Image (cartoon, coloured by chain):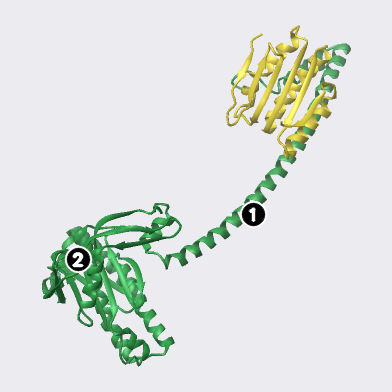
Chain colours: A yellow, B green
Amino acid sequence: MNDLIIESTDRTPAIRFIHQTLRLEIEGESYPEDVAAFYGQVIPTIEQWQRSDVTSLEVSINLIYINSSSMKALYRIFDVLDHGRASGKQVRVQWSYVEDDDVMQELGEDFRDRFPELAVDVKVTD
Amino acid sequence: MSTSGFDLFDREKRLLEEGPSVFEQGSVTQLRDFSERLFERFRGVVRENEDLTKHSDRQERRLVKLNQNLKAQTKELDERKVALETLSRQLAKYLPPQIHEALFAGRYDTEVRTQRKRLTVFFSDIKDFTQTAESLQPETLTEYLNEYFSEMTRIALSFGATIDKYIGDAMMVFFGDPESRGEREDARACLSMALAMQDRLRELHAIWTSRGFQQPFVVRMGINTGYCNVGNFGSSERLSYTIVGGEVNVAARLESNADPGGLLISYETYALVRDLVDVEERQSVRMKGIARDIRTFAVLKRSKNSQDNDTVRLSDPAGVDISIDKSDLSAERKAELAVKLRHLAQQLEC
């Protein structure tokens, strides 16, 4: 499995999937022109992790803005993570939001409620 | 489907594609399995949609809030703009228009800095102002003085003068900074301004006399051309844009030596405007700090040549002051101006 490193742009978040540290980071704003093309780079890598022998993953999500299409992609990522968890992998998700950003806080709480087994920790960015 | 081949709805689409064949040919076991997967995906889609709708509503709420904030900020900015414009208009009355314009365009350097520059300096002063003032009620004096300064200022600005200051009943004006059309043109503009002021003063005399002003203002004027220090004088806290130097004092001295109602110019100015006016040489003046004898010339009238051939003028109390030096204009520019003036005349007649 290769590492995945995507630099952020004005419209897309930085995404880093580092196998050595077993860590996935998603950080920035997400409203790509072609959501499927952008997340099409990411989701197969996570699916690969799900099928692999790797037993754990730390996920850090720190988004400032996310549009509806990106949310669909994020749901897909959470689905894959949850399947990984269901198959015995240890998955921890930290959802960070900027202080006073109610929208991103509530979205994190929605994901926490939808995927209760994933132990999503919603907290203000340090 | 994206260009990458990945499809966010691939799971839903696969089920839709699979459905018809399962319904037509599938066994009960296959139908059960398909129904379970369809149900599971349907539940997932409903959950996603619920959350998407909530998220969309929250985003909308944030947008509305941002829009309200933007409107409030725009309103505040508009109010500040109006306040600034009012302040700017008020400030404009205290500053030379060129400086005011440059300041508000962000082009003006407010450092304490001066430069030596050859300028044409104009002074005017009302003869026997103190006695005249004593013979009038203060309110009446204020009215005539304001009218006098308003008229003279309007003329000065129309010729592109930089109004340095009003000193009691005196006016100090110069040409050549911050904008200059060249030493010769600056001197000629200054002279033309002074002559236009004299023309207007003659008209004002008639108006004032008819209103009961028995001894209307008689104004002396002086013009000199020479090197002065021009720029921002003072401290970094309080600046004054002005000119200083011996040549400025020469202009003031010429004004005090002028005939009542007359205009006295130095040789340095005369050399630049000699074709515009008829003059009479007067006694030279010696001044402290000025090495040369200052030759002086009383301006008698516009030269015939200048009046007949070179300059077209129209001056009217309705606010018209036109002075066009034809010698500087090409045939095309003359025709262009004539069209504009004809258009103006047509507008006036409507």
Crowd tier of the residue under label 2, counting other residues whose Cα lies within 10 Å: few below 14, some 14–19, many 20 or above? some
The CA span between labels 2 and 1 is: 53 Å
Say above or below: A65 vs B238.
above
The foreground one among A101 and B243 is: B243
- Whether residue B53 is visible: no
Q: Where is residue B54 in the image (x, y as percent from the top left)?
A: 77, 37
Task: Name, please, the residue furthest toward the front.
Answer: B288
- Where is residue B161, by image quadrant? bottom left
The foreground one among B22 and B283 is: B283
Q: Position of residue B130 (x, y in %)?
A: 34, 85
Q: Position of residue B64 (x, y in %)?
A: 69, 47
- Where is residue B168, by image quadrant? bottom left
What is the secondary structure assignment of the residue under circle 1?
A: helix
Rendered residue at 32%/75% (across/down): B170
**What is the chain letter for disc 2?**
B
The foreground one among A103 and A36 is: A103
Q: Is residue B101 rendered to the left or right of residue B128? A: right
Q: Which mark is residue B72?
A: 1
Say above or below: B166 vs B331.
below
**What is the chain letter for disc 1?**
B
Q: Residue B325 carries which label?
A: 2
Rendered residue at 27%/72% (across/down): B123
- Where is residue B238, by image quadrant? bottom left
Going by the numbered disc 2, the residue's amino acid type is Asp
Position of the N terminus of chain A by quadrant: top right
